[in-house]
Amino acid sequence: MSWLVSLLVLSGLIFFHELGHYGAARLMGVYVEVFSIGFGKKLYSFKAWGTQWSISAIPLGGYVQMKGQNDSDPSDISYDDDSYNVKTPSQRIFILLAGPAANFVLAFILYFGIALGGPNILSPVIGKVVKDSPAFVAGLETNDTIRSINGVDITTWEEMAKIISTSEGTLNVEIERAGFLEHKNLTPKFSESQNMYGETIQKKMIGIGAAGVTHELKLSMG
C-alpha cells in the first residue's frame, strides 16, 4: 500500500509541474499538443481545449509537447505564430521555469493549509508500561501524562523520546496523574528497537508505549 501512496504523491507532483509548463505555454500563445502523465503506452486519453491529455503506463515522469517541439522527430519543426520556436528567449525561459515554479507554489499552499489547520501530533500520554522496565520500577502508570524531564517542558511524544534517547544518567520526570503533579526518578536502559528502515538498533528507553492520544500542533508562521 505504501508504494501506491508514493506513486500517487509522485504523480500529483508531476501533474502540477507539467501544469505549470502548460499554463505558461498557453499564456504565451503556444499551442500545446500533448499533456502526458507518465511515458510509454497510453492507458487513457481524451482531448480537451485542443490538447491530448494522457495517462501512460510508466508513471515516472511526464511531459508537455508544444507545437514545434517533437523529440521523436527533430525534423518536425514549425514556425507558425503559435509555435514554441517563434517565441522570444524570455518567453521560452518563462515557459521552462513555470514547471518548477508551480511546485514551489504547491508547496507553499500545502504548508499554509497545514499551518491553518494544525496537524494532530502524538501527546506524551502513557499507554502501556512494560513490566520490570525503568518506568515500571519508578511507578509510572497508564494514562500518566509526562509534563517535563529534568525541567524541560514536554508537549509531544517525539520530544520526550528524543530527550530520553540522548540522556545521560538519572532523569527527573514530572508527570500529571488525576490532575496532580508528581516527580519520578528513573534511569533509561539500552533496549533493541527498529529504525525507519527496519534495522535493529540499540536505543535508550524507559519501557513505555503511547496511549494514542493526540492534540493539535500549533505552528508559527513567523
Image (cartoon, helix red, strand yellow):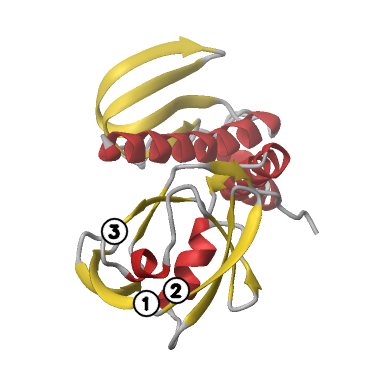
Q: Earlier in the sequence, mark 2 or mark 3?
A: 3
Q: Nearer the viewer, mark 1 or mark 2?
A: 1
Q: Residue furthest right?
A: 222
Q: Is residue 120 above or below residue 183?
A: above
Q: Are marks 1 and 2 in contact (CB under 8 Å)?
A: yes
Residue occupied by mark 1: 188
Front residue of 135 and 139: 139
Residue occupied by mark 3: 130
Badge 3 marks a residue whose secondary structure is loop
- Give the residue drawn at x 70%, y 31%: 27
Q: Mark 2 belongs to which amino acid? A: Ile
Front residue of 22 and 135: 135
- Give the residue drawn at x 54%, y 50%: 123
Q: Is residue 122 above or below residue 200?
A: above
> Does the rendering let one see residue 77?
no
Q: Earlier in the sequence, mark 3 or mark 1?
A: 3
Q: Are marks 3 and 1 in contact (CB under 8 Å)?
A: no
167 displayed left or right of 61? right
Residue occupied by mark 2: 164
Task: Quote the CA–CA distance across marks 2 and 3.
Answer: 16 Å
Q: Mark 1 belongs to which amino acid? A: Pro
Badge 2 marks a residue whose secondary structure is helix
